Amino acid sequence: MSAPLDALAQDFVAFAVEASVLRFGEFKTKAGRLSPYFFNAGLFDDGAKLGRLAGFYADRLIASGLAFDMIFGPAYKGITLAAAVSIELARRGRNVPFAYNRKEAKDHGEGGTLVGAPVQGRVLIIDDVISAGTSVRESIQMIEAAGATPCGVAIALDRQEKAAEGGVDSPHSAVQQVQQRYGLPVVAIAGLADLLSFIDGSPALAAHRPAVLAYRERYGV
């Protein structure tokens, strides 16, 4: 990863910590693990935070060179992210349509499960993290059913840890599984390695470094 991308990741981690979106302590993950940190994108909960978050997504997407025609946000967190990132891209001179899904289909009005722009062309899926890959799989199914082509996934944080399948640790992370199973690139603003680099440069967080390192040793990929 080039220095500018490292700088972007460090700025993002600093922002997430400042906004209390990234917290340290002891948290139980979906996989039942006790994690020394927790990332809750639902706490980007005001206009200023959401706007800045969208800027980080836009910066990372532009730097990645990933080509896409529209954005798809899976319900629920992806809906806000898709809207915010499309606004930010338009502010920068690239007006990209977006769509999202409902959890339950409507049987009145326009009906169906998809809302927003027609799902067509190369579709970028945007979400906060990839935990089990379920949201990505369901998004791919909806995009392909609409006759479009999923072309990549953008997330805020890659935990870079082994996925848990049926209570057994996989040798691959959830992000790696998405890349391998669907052949899609995954673009992340930052990862666990960036988080550790940030802790190394932050005396205020030094006490959490041993726990994060131990977690990476046990579950990291």
Image: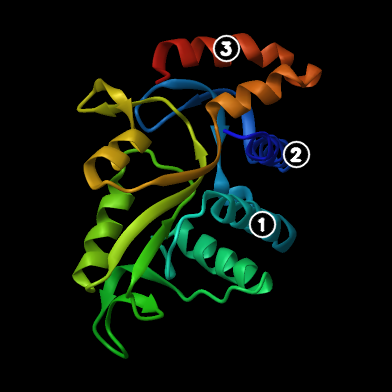
| 3 or 1: tag closer to the N-terminus | 1
Left or right, residue 221 beside residue 26: left
Q: What's the distance in space between the residues labelled 3 and 1, CA to CA?
A: 31 Å
What's the residue at 45%, 52% (across, down)? Answer: 127
- In the rendering, at what x and y percent does residue 28 appear? 45, 26
In the picture, residue 190 is in which quadrant?
top right
Q: What's the distance in space between the residues labelled 2 and 1, CA to CA?
A: 16 Å
Say what secondary structure mark 3 lies in: helix
Verify CB contact (< 8 Å) between mark 2 and mark 1.
Answer: no
Q: Where is 77 relative to 103, above or below?
A: above
**Residue behind mark 2:** 18
Q: Where is 187 relative to 124, above or below?
A: above
Badge 3 crowding class, 10 Å Cα cut-off, few under 14, some 14 to 19, many 20 or more, is some
Badge 2 crowding class, 10 Å Cα cut-off, few under 14, some 14 to 19, many 20 or more, is few
Depth check: 4 or 30 in front? 4
Left or right, residue 17 beside residue 163: right
Quadrant for the C terminus, please: top left
Residue 211: mark in rendering: 3
In the picture, residue 170 is in which quadrant?
top left
* Residue lying at the far bottom of the rendered structure: 109
Badge 1 crowding class, 10 Å Cα cut-off, few under 14, some 14 to 19, many 20 or more, is some
Q: Where is 34 relative to 23, above or below?
A: above
**Residue behind mark 1:** 55
Residue type, label 2: Glu
Viewer-nearest of discs 2 and 1: 1
Residue type, label 1: Gly
Residue type, label 3: Ala
Left or right, residue 126 beside residue 171: right
Quadrant for the N terminus, please: top right
